Amino acid sequence: MAPSVEPGHKEKNAGLLETYGLPMWTFPLTIIFVVLFAICVEWDPKFAEDLITTNNEFNADKTDTVQYFTREIRTRAEGGLENYVMYMNTAVMCLIGFGFLYVFSKFYVWGGVGFNFFICGLGFMWTFIVISLVTSMFHGHFEKAEINCDNMMLSADISAAVLISFGAFYGFTSPSQIILITIVEIFMCVVNEHIVLDLIHVKDQGGSMVVHAFGAYFGVATVFGMGLKSKHLPEKHRTTTYFSDMGAMLGTVVLWVYWPSFNAASLYGDTHIQGRVIGNTYLSICASCVTAFATSALIHRGKLEMIEIQNGTLAGGVIVGTISPFLIEPWTAVLIGSIGGVISTFGYGLLHPFLEDCGILDSAGVQMLHGIPGVLGGLFAALATLADNMNYAFSYDTTWTNTLDFDRSRGQQFGYHLGAILVTLGIAIVSGVITGVLIRLPICPAVEKEDMLIDHDFWNIHDKNHDPRLKKEKRGNVYNNKYAEASA
């Protein structure tokens, strides 16, 4: 008699790695992290060094001296916490915004929000180690990463790239594969950021290129490396429901509200530019919200498509990211955001199905929200460097104070900006394809194609009848599982 498979549970005869892949990867990795944190990470002196003074004073009868200590109390700014609010805003975007944006699937709700949470925890820690390793590699000597609000903010930014990639392989990967993807992508993302920002000298304040475009095309390339096509997926697994789409809309609203903080977070030391970034992002994302609704109604003959509203409304925050600190007029930010909303919505409505027919699989359509708007954001910023003002200086160094050391003309900075876009796309696509091939190795248990986009193999779901792999015909009160072999 062949063993049967209970829907929503792993097979009884599954191998050890297939059953316990997550803890078998996670616990050894945690030990490695502890060791690497001891080697590569240290406290920022503002947090670690209490200003303690040793004092000596005679006792009451003046026969002996008593030693005591005093500690100086610092204000928020003096203690290095002036950027903590911006970090919290970005963390909310990562955990709640992206998390709930990924509950749109009918059968992959827990996986969407749950594995998004897991990526944040893993990514936030791993980024500190990578900062030390990559900085040491580029500077030629060992440097430790400091625990401070700046690096906490950077860890959230870099992890956001992985959350974007997660949308491309959403529902296609096991927890073990997600771990390996996160480890590789964060390393390559920090490498790319060093190349673009420090070697090519093209600043990307809102991450249009180094976060959004990188994350989108790394994710799409990973799916390509996995060898997946849309024809491999059961169509009923890709459906949404009225309520799952409503949950995803909550994520959209959270992202929309906090996006100006994401783009402006690192500029707390220059409130003049920070205010401009917040204002430009605010105008752009408002404009994309309006044009996304209008474009969706245009595509669908007066009706709105929820997935287009969930994503197209946010495109203004992506597309304005690189140009947000530049000297542009308010109408320019509105125009850029409007273009982002139109292009993203048309992408979801028309381009996304076409690309899937061409064999380019993108589970949540991250190319349409992050990939194409991210590249266009880089192009708009490149064009802005040619303007007869100081935009080329903001491209070279967002917080510049003088141009004495600048050795480039506007035209040269335009060329370097285009080069930064190509480098980002090249590193993202090549490393993504390689990662997609790597996660097919036996050390990473894979998800069978007929089991993709469902929660039941990785979560204890008590409603067994929710498993879409169950046959719909009923015999008495029992649903038949198509995987359960008949008893001999």
Image (cartoon, rainbow, N blue to C red):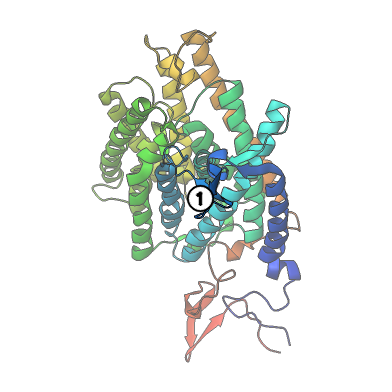
Q: Which residue is mark 1?
A: 167
Residue 173 versus residue 474 in the image, above or below: above
Image point 49% across, 38% down: which residue? 212
Is 247 on the left or on the right of 422, as rendered? Answer: left
Is 102 on the left or on the right of 282, as rendered? Answer: right
* Residue 141 pos. (x, y %): 73, 29
Confirm whether residue 461 shows in the render: yes
Q: Is 315 or 128 nearer to us in this picture? A: 128
Image point 49% across, 55% down: which residue? 60
The quarter in which the N terminus is drawn is bottom right
* Residue 385 pos. (x, y %): 43, 15
The quarter in which the C terminus is drawn is bottom right
Is 231 on the left or on the right of 3, as rendered? Answer: left
Residue sitting at the far bottom: 476
Q: Is 291 or 479 nearer to us in this picture? A: 291
Q: Is 263 or 369 nearer to us in this picture? A: 263
* Residue 59 pos. (x, y %): 53, 53
How many numbered marks have been drawn onto this rendered protein structure?
1
Image-quadrant location for residue 287: top left
Q: Tag 1: residue type?
A: Gly
Residue 106 versus residue 382 in the image, above or below: below
* Residue 203 pos. (x, y %): 50, 25
Q: Residues within 10 Å of mark 1 (few under 14, many from 20)?
A: many
Secondary structure under badge 1? helix
